[in-house]
Amino acid sequence: MKKILNLKNVICPINFVKAKIFLEEIDPGEEVEIILEEGEPLVNVTRSLKEEGHKVIKVEQFDKSCCKVTVKKGEEDVK
Amino acid sequence: METNTDELKKIGIISQKQKSLFTIRIKAVAGDFTTEEVSIIANIAKKYGDGRVHLTTRQGIEIHNVNISNIEKVKDALSNGGIVLGACGPRGRGIVACPGAATCKYGIIETKELAKELDNLYFRKEAPAKFKISVSGCPNNCSKPIENDVGVMGGVLPDWKKDICIDCGLCIKVCPTEAIVKTEKGYELSLDKCILCGICINNCPVSAWEEKKKGYTLWLGGTMGKKPRLATKAKVLIENKEELLTFIKRAYEFFKKEGRKKERFGHCLDRYGLENALKEILNEENS
């Protein structure tokens, strides 16, 4: 069972800050699930995760307005 | 001293409702001023204005409430500081631009150098009505090119690489115009829907979406004001700057030839017949 972070109704950039803290707690290479609102949150957070060296593995519809994003934590912290 | 207000207006000296007071408009290109220029302008506003500067919608600066007796002194002080007055009335206005690819992570094209080139070509150039040009680095439209008579926008055409794609589905979800669909052949891009923003390229975790082509999108005939009209997308992915400048030159010449006094470029295009007007402006054999 993957760890899950629900960021429904969490606005930018707080959602990314929470995602970043969440990912700090897990091991490199481990996969987690993040629930993100479609639209701006999904666009911004997935772009920022890429910039931080993490990798989106899968994006699925979670509910009417949110996606479930499977993210693999990057091997090294990218500054 | 010049007293013809139309002559003064040409160089951005605008009579206020108060008979003896004038607004001094200062030229801006892409909204950039050096700290030295800002401090010179501030000192002049303190001495001859009311101790305040006004920021305009075209990224410029104005000094308000200058007494008519001080206009020559303000002109001299600005010119000694290397600062150029603005433009008003039926002519090319200050060129607006967003920061573009130089600093913005969304920027697809360089905007500031292009704004300088356009300024050299069109600033204060006589036209049937005001003639506004804006440059934006990407389809985010921050500097509102589609609300200007001529708008230039950066755009990037994405291309999907099957062997790199991990089928995560992110691109389908982040595309703002639903231009990407998954079919039995893979991920397909609808060219009709794609607005060339490059979000798929920026967000793809494995860079399966790559830049295939990058260029300028030319928008013509935008205006706000009393009769708003958003610009018409005239041409996309113009790869060559000279080609872009040729199209803009032809657009300006068309407006000079066909525009009625005080009629904005977009309304001129509509009256003439948009399709024929664009054909005339864009047809390479016409030059």
Image: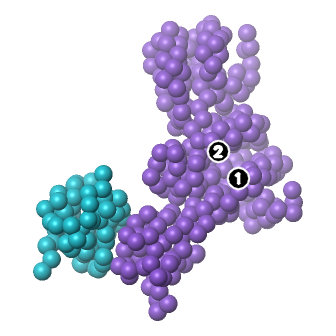
Q: Which chain is cyan?
A: A
Residue assigned mark 1? B241
Within-10-Å neighbours for mark 1: few <14, some 14–19, many 20+: few
Determine the secondary structure under disc 1. helix
Q: Quadrant of residue A73?
A: bottom left
Q: Which mark is residue B114?
A: 2
Amino acid type at mark 1: Lys
Q: Is residue B221 left or right of residue B285?
A: left
Q: Mark 1 near mark 2, Cβ–Cβ under 8 Å?
A: yes
| Residue B147 to residue B157: above or below | above
Any idea which chain is the purple one in this picture? B
The image quarter containing residue B18 is top right
Same subunit, labels 1 and 2: the answer reads: yes
Q: Residue at x 78, y 49 (%)?
A: B249
On residue B101, which mark appears? none
Q: Is residue B266 visible?
A: no
The one of B126 and A13 positioned closer to us in this rendering: A13
Mark 1 → mark 2, Cα distance in angstroms: 9 Å
- Report the chain holding disc 2: B
The three-letter code of the residue at mark 2 reads Leu
